[in-house]
Amino acid sequence: TPVVEYRDVRKQYGNFTALDGVSARVNRGEVLCLIGPSGSGKSTLLRTTNALEVIDGGQLYFDGHPLPSSKAEIRKVRQRMGMVFQSFELFPHKTVLENITIGPLTVLGISEAEANARARVLLEKVGLTDKADRYPANLSGGQQQRVAIARALAMEPEVMLFDEPTSALDPETIGEVLNVMKRLADEGMTMVVVTHEMSFARRVADWVVVFDHGKIVEQGPPAQIFDAP
Ligand code: ADP
Ligand code: ADP
């Protein structure tokens, strides 16, 4: 079964149709990239995945089950998905280490020692071992985004959702974030990525979905999307 499946998904904002008949899926261990012009519905689809946006038509399946509608059930499902936003959204008054441990400590109820150990492993994975005691404001954008990725991973999600993770970054720090994402993909993480980084999509995606005006205009493997004559 796919980890996430969108079937004929529709989303309205008043009279405006943001998503119209969108069907796609993400298989386990694969990377789905959502591309297309600004305002075409990529972020809206991503945000339906964990019910940050509620769909108005069609069906959405997570791990083979329809996305629940009750608040308590949605919260449980959300804990199984990691999300990384364009704007990092770290806790400014917590250190890097605390930003990563807070989810596991408060939600998973593991011990502080275990949470710290887990955070250290993740800091190494994102190349920030020496920044554990810093505050977010003292890091570059690229470093903050890598902390945000580590924070999401600390919950041991089954899928990672990325909403234009490099769009707010200085050009010189984009590569370090994309490299971390590429490594995650190589390790078998299931990922849905909204991005304007075409070279990343071409190199890393297993499947690419192209949006325009709330509809999918094309989908397929990157070679077909990017190399078609
Ligand atoms: P649907 O188009 O509704 O997904 P199928 O499941 O029969 O119908 O898929 C049609 C084709 O599209 C198959 O060859 C399938 O391998 C391919 N396909 C669709 N989505 C993906 C995906 N996310 N990853 C890989 N292949 C996919
Ligand atoms: P993309 O991610 O492709 O840039 P979005 O999914 O963010 O596009 O937006 C798709 C369309 O839906 C845009 O026209 C946007 O203005 C509109 N939209 C998104 N969120 C809202 C909202 N909360 N209320 C009204 N319109 C919205």
Image: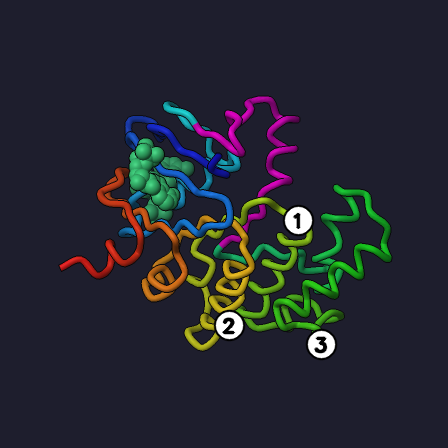
Residue wearing tag 3: 130
Q: Residues within 10 Å of mark 3 (few under 14, many from 20)?
A: few
- Vertical order, 72 against 28 (above or below): above
- Vertical order, 12 against 123 (above or below): above
- Vertical order, 4 against 31 (above or below): above
Residue wearing tag 2: 176
* Residue segment shown in magenta: 60-85
Residue 18 in sight = no
Q: Nearer the viewer, mark 1 or mark 2?
A: 1
Q: Is residue 68 left or right of residue 195?
A: right
Mark 3 to mark 2: distance in Å? 16 Å
Residue wearing tag 1: 156
Which amino acid is tagged 1? Glu
Mark 1 to mark 3: distance in Å? 23 Å
Disc 3 + disc 2, Cβ < 8 Å: no
Q: Is residue 102 left or right of residue 67?
A: right
Disc 1 + disc 3, Cβ < 8 Å: no
Q: Secondary structure at mark 2?
A: helix
First in sequence, mark 1 or 3: give its number: 3
Q: Residues within 10 Å of mark 1 (few under 14, many from 20)?
A: some
